[in-house]
Amino acid sequence: MIEILKAFLLGGCICIIGQILIDFTKITPARIMVIFVVSGVVLGMFGLYQPLIDWGGAGATVPLVGFGNVLAKGVMKEINEVGFLGIFTGGVKAAAAGITAAITFGYIMAIISKPKIKS
Amino acid sequence: MKKQISKHEYQRLVDEKAPGSHYVKNLFAAFITGGAICSVGQIVMLVFKNFGADKETTASATSIIMIFIGAFLTGINIYDEIGKFGGAGASVPITGFSNSIVSPAMEFKKEGHVMGVGAKMFLIAGPVLVYGIFASVVAGLVYFIWKQVM
């Protein structure tokens, strides 16, 4: 139960940062998403994101920063295992599940559903 | 009509910047929405853990399920409502990433399966992947060089 509460608090706080950027700067949500993923890569590279995951679980992994962290961790792991080629394979390899799921479910849902017409 | 929805979709938060908007309310809504979505993620993770899945399987499976939930709720036109309330609380989690794929794909279906659905799916997800993956290559390069030097 405490894990869910921690996830709630951490996830909520990360989203507040996004909301502050939206409300107080001219940054659009799409740019926020890009900024968050890239920040995740940078934080992940220096191992700064892992403590947040250890504390808040899904509160850290579900936000897009967590996706960036997965990319960074993946690329470093792959470099350790296969060397130079890992620079090109590691990131997407680690994020494969998310990317493929997003494309697959995204495509299926887009095909079968109808956009709401605003009255 | 379609265009209006499209604008609404991705600029609703910008519109909320209009005079008289309530920053505190927005921050609170983002906190509650983002927190709630992450809590769902945590519950999914705990379920997988209870079934004895290892760390990596749990992480991948949780993203897959969260992405499915985001795509599904977008398809039945519920995620838009969550987004209207929650702002960044809805777009920052990975469910928002899948929302950003389904939403334009649905809208541009009329332009065909290739240049409509196929291309417009990546209207926002594309940039996210481009900069995310490019950043990972740069990070990898830096890490590789650092490893050689050390």
Image (cartoon, rainbow, N blue to C red):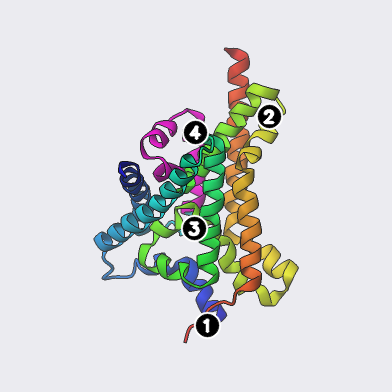
Residue A23 position in % (x across, y down): 34, 59
| Front-lying residue, A95 or B19 | A95
Residue B65 position in % (x across, y down): 54, 53
Badge 2 element: helix
Q: Are marks 2 and 1 in contact (CB under 8 Å)?
A: no
The chain holding disc 2 is: A
- Judge left or right: residue A90 versus residue B41: right
Give the mark nearer the N terminus: 4 vs 2: 4
Magenta includes B55?
Answer: no
Which residue in the structure is indicated by mark 1? Answer: A117
What amino acid is found at the position of numbered circle 3 in the picture? Gly
Q: Which residues are magenta?
A: A32-61
> What separation in Å lies between label 1 and label 4 (alpha carbons)?
41 Å
Q: Which mark is residue A57?
A: none
Q: Which mark is residue A44?
A: 4
What amino acid is found at the position of numbered circle 1 in the picture? Ile
Residue found farthest to the bottom: A119
> What separation in Å lies between label 4 and label 2 (alpha carbons)?
16 Å
Give the mark nearer the N terminus: 1 vs 4: 4
* Disc 2 and disc 1 on one polypeptide chain: yes
Q: Residue at x 73, y 70 (%)?
A: B113
Badge 4 element: helix
Circle 3 Cα neighbour tier, 10 Å, few/some/many (<14 / 14–19 / ≥20): many
* Disc 3 and disc 1 on one polypeptide chain: no
Q: Which mark is residue B96?
A: 3
